[in-house]
Image: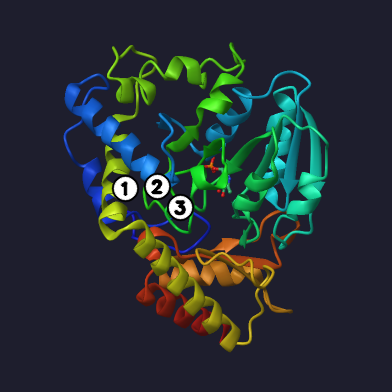
Amino acid sequence: MIRERHLFGPGPSNPYPEATRALAEPLLGHLDPEFLRIMDETCDMLRAAWGTDNTRTLPLSATGSAGMEAAFVNTVHPGDVVVVAVNGLFGQRMTDVAARCGAEVVAVEHDWGQPVDVDRVLAAHPSPAIIAAVHAETSTGVRSDIAALGAGKGDALLLTDAVTSIGGIELRADDWGVDIGYAGTQKCLGVAPGLAPFTINDRAFERRVETPRSWYLDLGMLGGYVGEAGVKGGQRTYHHTAPTAMVASLHGGLTRILEEGLEGVWARHQEAGDALQAGLQEMGLELFAAEGSRLPELTTVNVPDGVDSAAVRKELLDRHGIEIGAGAGAYAASVWRIGLMGRNARPDAVLLVLAALKDVLG
Ligand code: PLP
């Protein structure tokens, strides 16, 4: 028997009960009409969560990093200039993935903990094919202004990582000019890891790579099974065996979120994050992310001098069943990451993590 944990790290978070319950339903085949209904409804609900009307909106059968790969492998032609805003680990990962897809990468480096400097990114190259940025940098707890990048992108495609923002903070892909977006299920959507919600608009799809180097992530082929096929009511063709239980679970999580209402969900995350950040500061702890750009769903805290970061995390897990995250990259030992995502964005979770930290820090 596995003891239940409070998953207050950078993800996964504790799933919504609706997402967990769906996993216990009878398993369906991936071409069963009942499953196709669940898949089509899931795509509709994903459109709402993304804030898009894009026909090609679907859950890819893999984690968020596969969403990142799908985004670049389908849109980067050899030698394309791709400007990447790097203000943390996931921006860095984008540069790696884009380069592997044959891009000429222009990385615009930022200090970690700072939001993306929109002017610098837009000025980095006169005519990039793609501008890429992370909306919510999970490695640092920082939110960046995607709408401003969209307003200034010109002819470039805007590619956005929404892994830690979808279902947690305001996200309006169409209004903000996002052409390609990918996300994950295990953060604010409150579903286990395993799927990558993905969206691409007509403008980006028309410019896509006809035969991408990835067979599995080829959006042209996937469209025959999911996304386009669902909307157009076309004949479904087998592409791969969709993880039907995971899609049903995402359906459960999204149903819950949309019943509460996106704005209500965003407000709940904001309130929980504000309360946590105020409580941590009252304890004398310092926050890492720049003020004014702090994510409510993922709080980064400087580990106080003389405190053993790993020992505190172990005590929290052993004594209180609470998981929090270490810092990322160079900040592994000097920063903690506390996530209150999805179902965990609640006042009782705030009190629990603050009380447990007080207990362990003495
Ligand atoms: N992008 C961001 C912002 C993330 O936080 C993560 C995961 O934490 C990823 C991408 C990669 O997603 P995954 O770990 O699900 O492959």
**Residue at horizontal 69%, vertical 69%?**
290
Vertical order, 156 against 87 (above or below): above
Residue of label 1: 254
Q: Secondary structure at mark 3?
A: loop
Residue 210 x, y percent position in the rendering: 59, 12
Q: Pick whichever, 328 or 228, lies toward us.
A: 228
Residue 49 bears which disc, if any? 2
Q: Find out whether the residues at labels 1 and 3 contact each other: C-beta distance under 8 Å.
A: no
**Residue at horizontal 56%, vertical 35%?**
179
Residue 121 x, y percent position in the rendering: 77, 47
Task: Work out which quarter of the rendered image holds the C terminus and state it.
Answer: bottom right
| Ligand 1 neighbours mark 3 (CB distance < 8 Å) | yes
Q: Quadrant of ligand 1?
A: top right
Vertical order, 90 against 348 (above or below): above
Where, by quadrant of the figure, is residue 238 drawn? top left
Labels 2, 3: front one: 2
The crowding category of the residue bearing disc 3, from other C-alpha atoms within 10 Å (few below 14, some 14 to 19, many at least 20), is: many
Residue 187 bears which disc, if any? 3
**Residue at horizontal 60%, vertical 20%?**
208
Where, by quadrant of the figure, is residue 264 drawn? bottom left
Residue 32 x, y percent position in the rendering: 20, 21
